[in-house]
Image (cartoon, helix red, strand yellow):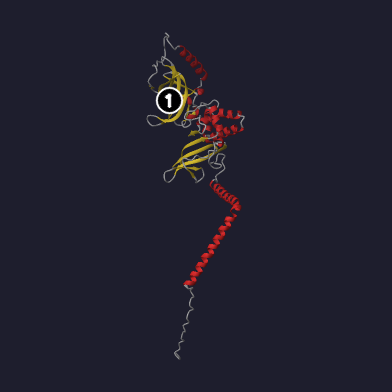
Amino acid sequence: MKGSGHTARRRVPRPKAKFPTKAKKKDKTMAERKAKSNRVTTRQDSLVTDTSASSDAGSEGEKSDEDSTTSAAEKEDNVVEEDPFAFVGDTTKGLDMDGRGKLCELHSYDSRFNSKGEPVVLRTGSNYGYKIDEEQSPEAAIVQIRYVSHGKVTLTCLKINSPYIQRALREVIGSYPSVNLDSHYEILLHGQPQCLFHYRRELEQYAAAADDTSMKEHVTFCLKYMNKALSKEILAFDAMTQSEGAVPRVNFEDLWMAFKPGCLVYTRMTGTEYVCKLVDVSRDEDEKRRDCWLLEVRRIEFNGKEFGYSDFGFQIPQFDGFKSLADLAVFPLVYHKEYERVRTELLARGKKYVSYSGVHYRKYDGVPFPALGAPRELQGHGMKQVWRTPL
């Protein structure tokens, strides 16, 4: 329009997009598929042709990659402070008996419950778990398993796989309560390594006299573990029992250290002195469910027909602080201040006792004991006597 003062806008048409026809699109798709098929066929033929030449190199390359990846992962999992008893290496699958326990190392594991309430064994310092029925580190000389509940260690189990340590324990100790030293597969020590402590001097002498280098190395390593595990207890016990001129004392928790199974113990019953042989010492509870130590002792008696062993059980109730060994109802004879007198007098009395077996007419002045038969209680000592087997 002319003279209106407005400029007319001219609409410019947009170029039309050119879409391929169905026939062209179909032909293009078929061509792409054919080309792709040709490439795949060519690649397969190439792989088949080069298989014989590259299989060995490929296998070695894959194995090298896997080894490097596994090694890196293991190093990352096992980043712990340096410790002579820390885990070293990994569990050896399918290890034969010839290599069992030959590695002079201690491998440590923790047994705890997972979120499902199932027991899982973890290598100390690792998140990788072993099944409960899998054996951990059979190649290690010593394997330590700590049982953890609610963040606290409730029990420690020591598995001795080393054939050298096993042989030393059998030859030096022979037998020990609650420990199967005759096993040639593994020897289990539950709780504190009490037998290693009680025979530490004998084992040190055994290792020093050994001609076999491996025997010397393994036994010495085992004693180092014991000294580390009981370092505080040994320090306190030696200070309270071996100080010159001091009265031997012991605290309640470590009372077992003074009572070596097989040693002679001294006691008084109804005013008469007796020396018995210690069979076992164990933690127990009295009739009021209070903590106590139970000492099982044995002596030789005559029931009117034959000599035999008579077993007694003494209870030592809990006490605070350190207590003199001589104040206990029963204590090792070696700590008696009149050791030589007691030994001489009781040996003479024992010989006279044996000589009176059979029929004799004698006047008796002493403590009357009924003939052994049914168990009997002796009041005032927490003691029970039971006739065992004849000699």
Residue 151 showing in the rendered view: no
Residue 226: horizontal and vertical position, in percent? 53, 34
> How many badges with numbers are in the image?
1
Check disc 1 and report the residue beneath it. Answer: 314
Q: Nearer the viewer, residue 169 or 60?
A: 60
Residue at 58%, 58% in the rendered image:
46
Which class describes the residues within 10 Å of circle 1: few (<14), some (14-19), or many (20+)?
Answer: some
User: Which quadrant of the view contains residue 293?
Assistant: top left
Judging from the image, what secondary structure is the residue with disc 1 in?
A: strand
Q: Nearer the viewer, residue 390 or 204?
A: 390
Give the farthest residue toward the top.
Answer: 361
Residue at 57%, 60% in the rendered image:
42
Residue 345 sits above or below residue 209 on the image: above
Q: Quadrant of the N terminus?
A: bottom left
Residue 362: horizontal and vertical position, in percent? 42, 9
Residue at 46%, 14% in the rendered image:
354
Residue at 50%, 69% in the rendered image:
27
